[in-house]
Amino acid sequence: MIGVGKIKQYSNVLDKPLSKGKQEVSLSAFAFLFSELVQYNQTQVDNIAELERRLEDAGYAVGARVLELLCHRDKGNRRETRLLGILSFVHSTVWKVLFGKVADSLEKGTEHEDEYMISEKELLVNKFISIPKDMGTFNCGAFVAGIVRGVLDSAGFPAVVTAHFVPMEGQQRPRTTILIKFAEEVLQREARLG
């Protein structure tokens, strides 16, 4: 019973364990910051494709940092080495940390061996966005596609990642699909690992 209830004293701030901290951000604060990010980038570009590319680049930096953080906290600095493992990690762990829930679906493409899709009925970055008629097919999901690409590239799984709207029958708003097309080297490595 000696020592029960005593708090361990740390002599140095570097000796203290990393706490998980508060993991939620106010939705209104996120919506405001994301809106500002979109508006700022909108003033810097001439077309929708360039705006989506800039949002994807911003998301890429976030994705690389999210992977580092999650690998350090949850996996003891270990990373996934298999294709299905990293896809499952993105679909569940990364999505849950970023959006508070697991993604709606993870599917393998039927036409191409190197394509996978993560689908979300109401992607948070598209939830409060109204797109003017002159912007046509603009998809803020490019930011999330950038996050996914950042996670995959940093984990050693280079891929082209894009966001697309997919109309759903009986729904006013289309779902967002994040299309992941892996580089040939990833598929060759996966085949060697068996």
Image (spheres, helix red, strand yellow):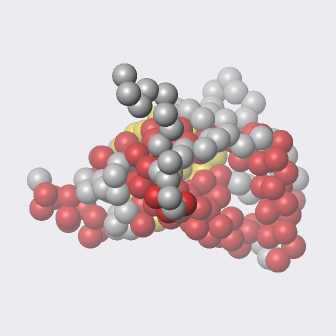
Establish if 147 lies above or below 183: above
Residue at the extreme front: 2
Taking depth in this image into account, of 44 and 174 the one nearest to the observer is 44
What is the number of callouts on the image? 0
Residue 92 drawn at (x, y percent):
45, 38
Taking depth in this image into account, of 9 and 39 the one nearest to the observer is 9
Establish if 47 lies above or below 98: below
Q: Residue at x 83, y 42 (%)?
A: 28
Residue 123 drawn at (x, y percent):
65, 41
Q: Residue at x 11, y 53 (%)?
A: 194
Left or right placement of residue 76 versus residue 138 in this view: left
- Where on the picture, by quarter, is residue 188? bottom left
- Where on the picture, by quarter, is residue 168? top right
Q: Is residue 130 visible?
A: yes
Q: Is residue 115 visible?
A: no
Q: Residue at x 77, y 40 (%)?
A: 27
Taking depth in this image into account, of 115 and 156 the one nearest to the observer is 156
Left or right placement of residue 106 versus residue 142 in this view: left
Establish if 108 lies above or below 173: below
Establish if 30 lies above or below 38: above
Q: Residue at x 73, y 35 (%)?
A: 173
Residue 68 drawn at (x, y percent):
46, 60
Quadrant for the N terminus, please.
Answer: top left
- Where on the picture, by quarter, is residue 152? bottom left
Residue 21 drawn at (x, y percent):
60, 44
